[in-house]
């Protein structure tokens, strides 16, 4: 039985929530939630299970405030306070509650599609890593400005055996260089290139392509050559899920089992999405028998 089919057996079909799958291996639209109210513990657990099983879920027509978004998201983990938000200047300018980040492309990026690699996972540069992101469409263009996710399990399974074997035992750095440029000191963390999901047991590629990945102990050119080959697999459309935003759409995803990228194709439209990232006590591991989970 394929991984996608075995997951399907666990998807609830009864009760308050309506779940519509969006891609063969991941992604679902979930109806039946009102995020203005706190969830019961049972419903919270059900939503958490949906995030982990489907990897990305979309909730439409959630016209909530920042505070309601923060209150909803933090039912699933502690908010990750972005180091840049600690800079008083940034906080004052954006007037954001602690734990909420706005994503507005810098002016220089308007109107051009970056040539650099953009697929990434939020919070991969922390230790332990982030669990989920909750991203809400606040001001979005009528067309364009989509976000795309890729299934990290499908990427791994799609790699030829030769590449799977080469990745075994490797660690890759997740280096947030831009923090250093802002005068913030932050350690460079390294995680296994392939991890075993701590809740589903699935093997996943875990490389964040914007965090300056470098295979630990390898020559830069050799590391780049292998990561470039892997990146080809990330770009395969069969593994992608694309969201057309509407105001009030909330996208939620598991950062351990997906990568994502935003499409900058909307000229100078003032697109604005707002995000809460929640943490976990999960230290990614390749070998389930050696998994280390920080005490909660
Ligand atoms: C992100 O890249 O983390 C945000 C995605 C988006 O702006 O759509």
Image (cartoon, grey):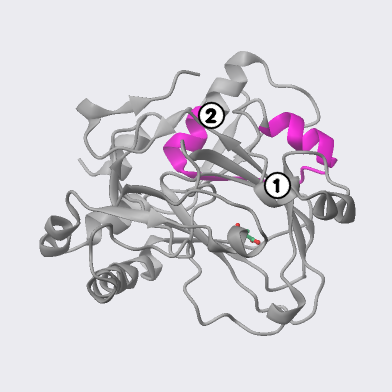
Q: Does the magenta-highlighted stretch encompass residue 50?
A: yes
| Residue 270, x across and y down, in percent | 82, 70
Ligand 1 within 8 angstroms of badge 1 C-beta: no
Q: Quadrant of residue 45?
A: top right
Residue pointed to by mark 1: 60
Q: Of discs 1 and 2, which sits in the foreground?
A: 2
Q: Which mark is residue 48?
A: 2
Q: Is residue 198 above or below residue 173?
A: above
Report the front residue among 126 and 11: 126
Depth check: 267 or 190 in front? 190
In this picture, residue 156 sits left or right of residue 210: left
Q: Residue at x 74, y 48 (%)?
A: 85
Image coordinates of residue 273 in percent, x first then y, are 74, 57
- Quarter of the image where the N terminus is located: top left
Task: Return the x and y of residue 180 as percentages of the image width and height.
Answer: 59, 60
Q: Which element is circle 1 on?
A: loop
Task: Find out whether residue 36 is within the magenta segment.
Answer: no
Segment tinted magenta in the rendering:
48-73
Give the quadrant of ligand 1: bottom right
């Amino acid at each position: 039985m394929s991984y996608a089919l075995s997951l399907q057996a666990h998807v609830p079909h009864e009760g308050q929530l309506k779940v519509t799958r969006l891609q063969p291996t991941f992604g679902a639209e979930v109806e039946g939630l009102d995020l203005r109210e706190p969830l019961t513990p049972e419903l919270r657990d059900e939503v958490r299970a949906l995030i982990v099983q489907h990897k990305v879920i979309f909730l439409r027509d959630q016209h909530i405030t920042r505070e309601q978004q923060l209150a909803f998201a933090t039912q699933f983990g502690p908010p990750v306070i972005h180091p840049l938000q600690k800079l008083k200047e940034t906080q004052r300018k954006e007037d954001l509650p602690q734990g909420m980040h706005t994503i507005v492309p810098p002016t220089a990026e308007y109107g051009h599609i970056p040539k650099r690699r953009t697929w990434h996972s939020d919070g991969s540069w922390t230790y332990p890593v982030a669990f989920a992101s909750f991203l809400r469409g606040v001001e979005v263009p009528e067309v364009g400005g989509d976000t795309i996710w890729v299934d990290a399990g499908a990427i791994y399974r799609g790699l030829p055996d030769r590449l799977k074997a080469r990745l075994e035992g490797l660690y890759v750095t997740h280096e947030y260089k831009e923090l250093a440029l802002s005068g913030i000191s932050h350690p460079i963390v390294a995680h296994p290139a392939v991890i075993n999901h701590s809740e589903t047991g699935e093997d996943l590629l875990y490389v964040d392509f914007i965090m300056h990945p470098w295979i630990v102990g390898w020559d830069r050119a050799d590391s780049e050559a292998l990561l470039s080959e892997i990146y080809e697999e990330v770009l395969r459309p069969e593994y992608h899920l694309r969201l057309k935003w509407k105001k009030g759409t909330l996208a939620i995803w598991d950062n351990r089992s997906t990568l994502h990228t935003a499409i900058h194709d909307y000229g100078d439209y003032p697109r604005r999405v707002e995000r809460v990232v929640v943490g976990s006590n999960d230290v990614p591991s390749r070998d389930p028998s050696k998994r280390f989970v920080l005490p909660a």
